[in-house]
Image (spheres, rainbow, N blue to C red):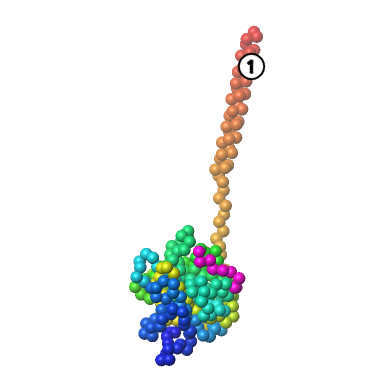
């Protein structure tokens, strides 16, 4: 747990910005005040190639309809640099997971709150106006805000294999897979961080506990098979063609009968 000691320091984590430490309860990255930004970053990088991170958090506030903006979990080469992406720097190098509680674009096909991930090599920008939609790696809908119990997240990473995020938000002690993405490779020696920010809308963004552990390597998983959708046979087109063909033949038959009737009538007149 990244709480401070008697000297108001943490052995494993640095904190800053508007972060407030309550040694008995949580680390509050932002309070219900506008234009706040806070961070919590590991002092040492993660050197393991296979690991698991479990964290307990709580997002809540006084408003039931206008709140935000959310917080982020980071596994990046950069650390403790403030910026416009949930309180951290843009053009990051590594993985960002955004627990977004405010819809900026107003054009999404999913509801909010929404959990979105982004893998970056330092060349891509996170677009706040679109809530990072164009650079999303994977994500899920998860109403993690203002739950009766502290919500949890569990990130599992196996290098060159997959990254998986599980969430506990619907029921206590019930994990749900938010996403699992194969063939993901993070930079070597990334720092673990949590950041949050508020704008005109606000929320308390609390980190309650963080635990990490090294995992044994896992055999490479094969990519899940994508179901192949067979093209539907256009029976309507076949029947339409046959109907037209019969109609044409019928019209020709009527014309032929009419012609023979006309020809026979003319012969009778000559006699």
Residue 149: percent from left, percent from top: 36, 75
Q: Is residue 150 magenta?
A: no
Q: Is residue 53 visible?
A: no
Which quarter of the rendering shows the C terminus?
A: top right
Report the residue at 64% width, 16% height from top. 263
Residue 51: percent from left, percent from top: 52, 80
Report the residue at 39% width, 65% height from top. 66
Q: Is residue 210 visible?
A: yes
In the structure shown, which secondary structural element does the residue marked by tag 1 occupy?
helix
Dominant SS type (magenta): loop
Who is closer to the viewer here, 82 or 42? Answer: 82
Q: Quadrant of residue 217?
A: bottom right
User: Around disc 1, counting alpha carbons within 10 Å, would you say few (fewer than 14), some (14 to 19), or many (20 or more)?
Assistant: few
Q: Residue furthest bottom?
A: 6
Report the residue at 53% width, 80% height from top. 79
Q: Is residue 124 magenta?
A: yes
Q: Which residue is mark 1?
A: 263
Residue 17: percent from left, percent from top: 46, 79
Residue 6: percent from left, percent from top: 41, 91
Report the residue at 51% width, 71% height from top. 84
Which quarter of the rendering shows the N terminus?
A: bottom left
Who is closer to the viewer here, 230 or 118? Answer: 118
Span of residues in magenta? 121-129
Q: Residue furthest top?
A: 271
Q: Is residue 259 above or below residue 165?
A: above
């Amino acid at each position: 747990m990244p709480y401070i000691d008697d000297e108001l320091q943490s052995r494993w984590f640095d904190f800053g910005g508007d972060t407030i430490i309550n040694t008995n309860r949580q680390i509050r990255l932002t309070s219900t005040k506008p234009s706040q930004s806070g961070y919590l970053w590991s002092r040492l990088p993660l050197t393991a190639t296979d690991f698991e991170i479990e964290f307990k958090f709580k997002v809540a506030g006084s408003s039931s309809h206008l709140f935000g903006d959310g917080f982020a979990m980071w596994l990046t080469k950069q650390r403790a640099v403030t910026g416009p992406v949930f309180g951290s720097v843009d053009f990051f190098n590594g993985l960002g997971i955004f627990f977004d509680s405010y819809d900026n674009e107003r054009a999404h096909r999913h509801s909010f709150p929404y959990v979105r991930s982004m893998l970056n090599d330092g060349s891509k920008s996170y677009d706040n106006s679109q809530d990072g939609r164009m650079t999303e790696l994977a994500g899920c809908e998860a109403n993690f805000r203002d739950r009766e119990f502290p919500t949890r997240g569990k990130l599992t990473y196996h290098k060159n294999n997959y990254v998986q995020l599980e969430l506990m938000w619907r029921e206590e002690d019930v994990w749900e897979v938010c996403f699992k993405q194969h063939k993901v490779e993070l930079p070597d020696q990334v720092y673990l961080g949590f950041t949050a920010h508020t704008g005109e809308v606000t929320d308390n963004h609390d980190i309650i506990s963080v635990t990490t552990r090294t995992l044994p390597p896992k055999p490479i998983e094969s990519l899940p098979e994508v179901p192949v959708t067979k093209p539907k046979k256009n029976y309507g087109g076949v029947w339409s063609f046959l109907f037209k063909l019969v109609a044409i033949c019928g019209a020709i038959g009527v014309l032929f009968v009419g012609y023979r009737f006309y020809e026979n009538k003319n012969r009778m007149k000559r006699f």
